[in-house]
Image (spheres, rainbow, N blue to C red):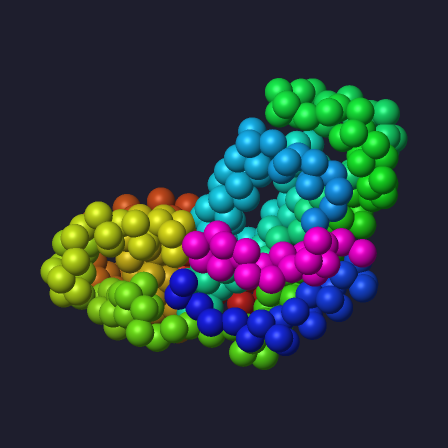
Amino acid sequence: MISCFDLIKLQSLLKDFYKITQIRITVFDDSFHELASYPEQIAPFCQIIRSTEQGASRCKACDEATCRRAAMRRSTFTYECHAGLTESITPIIVSNLVIGYLFFGHIFPYPTYEEGWERIAGRCKDYGLSMDTLKSACLMLPLIPADYIASASHIMQAVGSFLCMEHLVSLRQQELPIQIDEYIQAHFTENIDAISIATHFQIGKTKIYKIAKENYGIGIAEYIRNLRIEKARQLLMEQPGLPLAEIASMCGFPDYNYFITVFRKKEGTPPKTFQKEYFRKSEHR
């Protein structure tokens, strides 16, 4: 785990979220392990699902797959879980690293119990469960409309930001992913790549690729390119007199033509066009 949570204050915050929304909320670390939740007890519906090997396995796989997707998206999203209920997840990001996840679930989003049960029964029919027992638990879940779920997701996203602002979560600076990110931030305009970074830290390339995927949601080369393009954007907006060749060099692109190609692909327009559009819009503000 690359993060450190203040679990006492975190538990209090999760309790406040539940008081407002009446939706159970959970925190996972960067390795997809549950750290805290409120209420601690999961809903009877989910207890039944997890009572069989098939159901428990699908729950675990669903949670891990969703965390990975959140790391790649780097934003909150709401989805249907393997059992047919609605869940929402938001990544917790500190210093550009995904260090955990806020998650709420077990929501019955259907307009009627009949419609919802038909969907759920079809998804859970192979889990080796008593469908009558599962249906009874299903009928205990409150009907929650889509706009309420969306509002709860927005509040959860705000909770994630609050965690970071109030320092309820922090990075363990001695951890390798932190050291690698600090190194990249300091040297991305230089001639670095996965091989040179692996050599610097005396680790294998596979380890570098794994860290990049887990923490950035993209490959190491794409992450470095994104940092370079972001710097190019800033220079184009802040120093309009700089020649493009100089901007390319300052951002770590020794090949001027390659810089133009990468910038166009990332931003949808060539650098000069981007710059002209920026100042044209600035004049009309």
Vertical position of residue 129 compared to residue 252: above or below: above
Instruction: Specify the quadrant of the image occupied by residue 235.
Output: bottom left
Vertical position of residue 177 compared to residue 116: above or below: below
- Find residue 161 and report its horizontal and vertical position in percent: 59, 68
Frontmost residue, 142 versus 154: 142
Instruction: Specify the quadrant of the image occupied by residue 2.
Output: bottom left
Quarter of the image with the N terminus is: bottom left
Vertical position of residue 281 compared to residue 76: above or below: below
- Could you tell me which residue is drawn at 75 percent across and 68 percent down? 16
- Could you tell me which residue is drawn at 69 percent across and 65 percent down? 14
Frontmost residue, 83 versus 152: 83
- Could you tell me which residue is drawn at 49 percent across and 64 percent down? 93
Query: Does the rendering let one see residue 280?
Result: no
- Find residue 54 and report its horizontal and vertical position in percent: 56, 29
Q: How many numbered discs, if any?
A: 0
Residue interval drawn in magenta: 22-41
Quarter of the image with the C terminus is: bottom right
In-image side of 39 versus 61 (left or right): right
Magenta span has 35? yes
Magenta span has 143? no
- Find residue 141 and report its horizontal and vertical position in percent: 82, 41
- Find residue 139 and report its horizontal and vertical position in percent: 85, 35
Frontmost residue, 57 versus 20: 57
In-image side of 63 versus 38 (left or right): left
- Could you tell me which residue is drawn at 78 percent across and 39 percent down? 108
